[in-house]
Image: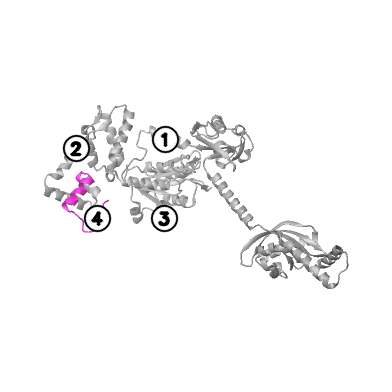
Amino acid sequence: MDDEERIRNSVKMLLGKPLDSSEAEKHLKVLQEKYQQILDGIEEGYVEVDLKGTIVLCNKSFSTITGYSTKELLGMNYRKFVSADVAEKVFNTYNEVYNSELSNKGFCYEITGRDGTKRIIENSISLIKDSRDRRKGFRSITRDITGRKHTERELEMHRRHLQAIFESVKDAIITFDSDMRIIESNAAAERICGILANNAGKEFNECMTYCMKNCFTAVKRILENGSVKEEYQIKCEHQHKPRQQVVITGSKLINSNGERIGTVIVIKDVTVLHYLENELRERHQFQNLIGKSVKMRDIFEILSSLTNLETTVLITGASGTGKSLVAKALHYSGIRAAKPIVTVNCSSLPESLLESELFGHTKGAFTGAIKDTMGRFETASDGTILLDEIGDISPRIQLKLLRVLEEKEYERVGESFTRKTNARVIACTNRNLKEKVRLGEFREDLFYRLKVVELKMPSLCERVEDIPLLIEYFLNTFRKKFSKNIYKVSNQVLENFMNYSWPGNIRELEHAMEHAFVFCNGPTVFPDHLPIELQAFESRTERIHESTERERDAILIALEKTGWNKAKAARFLRTSRTTLYRKIDKYRLFQCSDVTRM
C-alpha cells in the first residue's frame, strides 16, 4: 500500500462512510494540501527520494536551501546539485542505510545551488517502506549548516593563530586556575622553567624540580592579587642555568562574562641583558659603540636591521676603527647572544696552524698533535665566529672556508669524517678585498659569499663630531682605571684632537688619552700631557702657512705624489684631512677627472 492509498483509507475512516470517486478525490486533495502545509511549516528541509535518487516530495525549506522551486525539484535527481566526488559519497551513505536499515545522522556534504552558491548541508537519512515492508525510497531531514561550518573554520583558524603566537613567544607563558594548578604552558616555559606541556593539572610548585623556587613567592603573590603593576626581577639559581635572571609579570584570566577564572604569568629571561649591562658598565677598554655623526647613525641603523638576521657580514675599514666592536655588538644584540662568540686572528697564524685552529685536528695529524682538538668552528657552534683580518688567509684556507659558508661542512685536519656547523660568520678586514680579487690574491666567489652585507667603518677623521663623545668616554674609563680625578681636556687639546688626522683612528685616540692620564696630575689635560706627535701638531701645520704660494705648491706636490689620495696627502703634509680639504677648496685644486673624497 502506497501513501496515496493510505490517505484514501484514512479519509474513509474519518468520515465513517464510503465515498464515491469524485468525493474521495476532493478530500484526498484537501489532505494532501494540508500535508504539504505541515511539511512547508518545518524549518528544516524535508525531502523524499526513490531508490534511484529522484526527488518525489520536498518542502519549501529544502527549496530555499537549493535555490530551486518545489516544482523544479520534483523529478530531479540529487546528482543535479552535487559534484561527482560528492555524489559518490552520498551514494555510498544512502547505500549503507539501505543495507543496514539503520538511520544515518549528521552526514555532511556540499551542494551547489541554482545560482552557483556553495552550501554545506547536514542530512539525517532513514528508509521508506511500503505496506509489505519493501524498501521503496529514502526520507531526509536537511539542515543548512554553511554559516555554522564557516564559523567553526574561523574559530579553528583563530585558535591555530593564537596557538602559533603562544608557542612562538620567547617568554614563558603559564596560565593557572584559582588553586594554583597549571592550565597550560608554552614551549618557552619548558626552556626557561623546565615546565613540560604534560604538566597541565599539576601545582606550580610540583613542576619546579630543577631550581631553588626563588620565583615561587612572586608567582604566589601575583596569583593572589590577580595582577601587579611592578615587575619582579629574580635570580633563578636554576640547576641547569645557575646564572639565569628572569622578570615576572602577571594579570587576571577573565572569561566572557568578566569573571576571573585564573591568572596568566609571563616569565622573561633577561640573563643576557643583565650580564651584558654589567659587562658594559665595567669595561676598561673601548668595547661599545659611541657616535652621533651621520655615518655612525647609519651604522647603528644597519646593525638594528641585522639584529636577528642569520646572514654573513663583512666589516671593512682601517685599523683601529672598531670593526671587532661592531662584530660583538652584532652578536650580543641578536638571537645568538647567549651563545659564544669566538675570534680568530687570521693574520697571526701560518696556513697549517690556521687550518687546525679553524677546523681542529686529530691525534697524530701532524708533529705535536698529541690529542684530538676541537676547532674554532666547533667551539662556536650555534654562536658566532669572528674571522679577523680575513684578507690575509691563503688560497687553500679560502677554499675550505668557502665550503663552510656554502655547505656548513668541514673536516678536522687528519680526519675524513665530515662535521656540521651552525656558527654565524662575521669577517673583518682592513684590506681592499676587491683589489685583491682583481690581482688574483683572493677568491672572487668567497669575496661575494662574505659580502652578503658589508659594513664600512668610517675613519675617525670622517666622524670628527664624535671626538668630544669619545673623549668623555675615555675620561670616565681612565679615571676609574688610574683612580685620578681628571675630568676634562683643555680647549687647545680639543682643538688639536679635532684637527689631527688620526692615522691610528680610535685606537690612537684611546692611547693618547691613556698617555695623558699617566702624565697629568691635575683635573685638566693640557697639550704637554699628550704624546709628542700631538704636542707638535700645531707647529707642524704652521709650515703650510709660511706663504700662500709655497703652501699651494706644497699641497699640489703632495696630491700628485699620492695619486690625489687625500688621506695619504694629509699624512705626507702632516696635517689633518679637514684642513687639507679646506685648502684644496681655497686654492681650487682639482684633478682633471672627478675626484671622490676617500
The answer to whether the residues at label 3 and label 1 have Cβ atoms under 8 Å apart is no
Please identify, in this view, whether the residue under mark 2 or under mark 4 is nearer the observer: 4
Q: Residue type at mark 4?
A: Val
In the image, residue 169 lies at what x, y percent? 52, 43
Q: Earlier in the sequence, mark 3 or mark 2?
A: 3
Q: Nearer the viewer, mark 3 or mark 2?
A: 2
- CB contact under 8 Å: marks 4 and 3: no
Decide: few, some or many residues near mark 3? Use Cα within 10 Å; few <14, some 14-19, many ≥20: few
The percent position of residue 372, horizontal first and vertical second, equals: 51, 40
Residue at position x 50%, y 42% in the image: 362
Give the number of the disc on residue 595.
4
Tag 1 residue: 277
Q: Which mark is residue 445?
A: 3
> Image quadrant of residue 274?
top left
Q: Residues within 10 Å of mark 2 (few under 14, many from 20)?
A: some
Q: Nearer the viewer, residue 94 or 582?
A: 94
Going by the numbered disc 3, the residue's amino acid type is Asp
Cα–Cα span, label 2 and label 1 = 40 Å
For mark 2, give the secondary structure. loop
Mark found first going from the N terminus, 2 or 1: 1
Quadrant where the N terminus sits is: bottom right
Q: CA distance from mark 4 to mark 1?
A: 45 Å
The segment highlighted magenta reads 572-598
Mark 1 element type = helix
From the viewer's perspective, tell me whether residue 365 is left or right of residue 151: left
* Label 4 vs 3, first from the N-terminus: 3
Residue at 80%, 59% in the rendered image? 101
Q: Residues within 10 Å of mark 4 (few under 14, many from 20)?
A: few
Q: Amino acid at mark 2?
A: Ala
Is residue 218 visible to the viewer in this orientation of the structure? yes
Report which residue position mark 2 lands on: 536
